[in-house]
Amino acid sequence: MLSRTARSALRAAAAVPTRAAAAPAGVAGYATLREINDRLKSMNNMKKITNTMKVVASTKLTRASRAMEESRKYGETSQEVFEAAETKVPEVEEKKSLIIVCSSDRGLCGGIHSGLSRRIRKLFAEEGSSDLVVIGEKCRAQLSRSNPQSLQLTFAGVGRNVPTFADAQAIADQVSLLPTEYTDVKILYNKFINATSYEPTFIEAFSEEAITQSPNFSAFEVEEESLSNLREYSLANSLYWALAEGHACEMSSRRNAMDNATKNAGEMINKLQIQYNRSRQAVITNELVEIITGATASADM
């Protein structure tokens, strides 16, 4: 039989490995708590940023909507004139087409730019390639990888402010200076349907030859010397319409994207908070177990 002193010594020796093994778990628990707390701070900061961007996009959407309504008067009036004149793309053996893609330089607005690029790639796969004029760095970067040989002209610095007719006129001037005579000119832009949806759409911008061959164009009594100016002016009208409507779609898409990002950040914060509370409770429980175990061992000695 062991004496009382020997039994107490054996119990104390048996308790030492338990406390030593529990220490690394506590250290890991504290490290995990710090990691979770850091992630919580990061997600809270991200939620503040995305919420601020949503508010800014909502404010800009109001101004963009007003500009879109004004631009429609320009674009739709030009289209009504060509519809009354029954203007159509001339039938020629060698068709030379130009597509003007209206995007912008800014991201964080969902798939609004990639939708235009996909529409171009689909069109090229169905009907063959055409020359491209790209407005905005986003679509330029995407199309330069898939169709670099089609790019004829690019424009940057678009989308920072609400588009104006002067911006559209400057772009139309540069397009008119291209050396190639195009039989078919189209403008691809995002058509604003409502606050949550948009659709890539084409606007026909007729060439000077197509205007002169219109069956009912003589009813407007336009002098031949003014045809080139009319063609450039109608192109600027259509570009202004496309840029303004595309800008409104971008602001709406950015607001929706930031709203979704804010909601996702809130859900992530809730999950991390629950994980933090559970980890903290586990650490406290381990500490209590260690304290009780140590107190029991001390009492038995």
Image: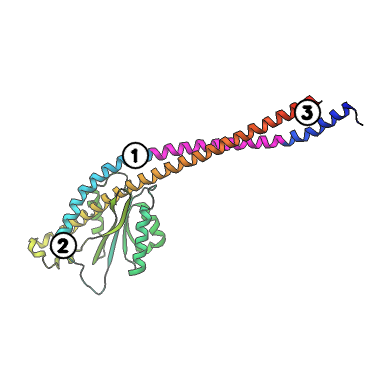
Q: Residue at x 38, y 56 (%)?
A: 114
Asked whether 296 or 198 is in front, the reply is: 296
Q: Which mark is residue 297?
A: 3
- Tell me the SS state at disc 3: helix
Amino acid carrying mark 3 in the image: Ala
Q: Secondary structure at mark 1?
A: helix
Q: Position of residue 131 (x, y in %)?
A: 31, 64
Of pointers 1 and 2, the one earlier in the residue sequence: 1
Relative side of 1 to 206, left or right: right
**Quadrant in which the C terminus is drawn:** top right
The residue depicted at 37 percent of the width and 40 percent of the height is: 53
Q: Could you tell me residue 267's position as x and y percent?
A: 47, 41
Q: Quick one: which residue is furthest to the bottom in this view? A: 93
Q: Nearer the viewer, residue 179 or 248?
A: 248
Q: Furthest residue to the front?
A: 1
Q: Which residues, given as a range, are shown in magenta?
A: 22-51
Quarter residue 215 falls in: bottom left
Q: Which residue is mark 2?
A: 83
Give the main secondary structure of the magenta stretch.
helix
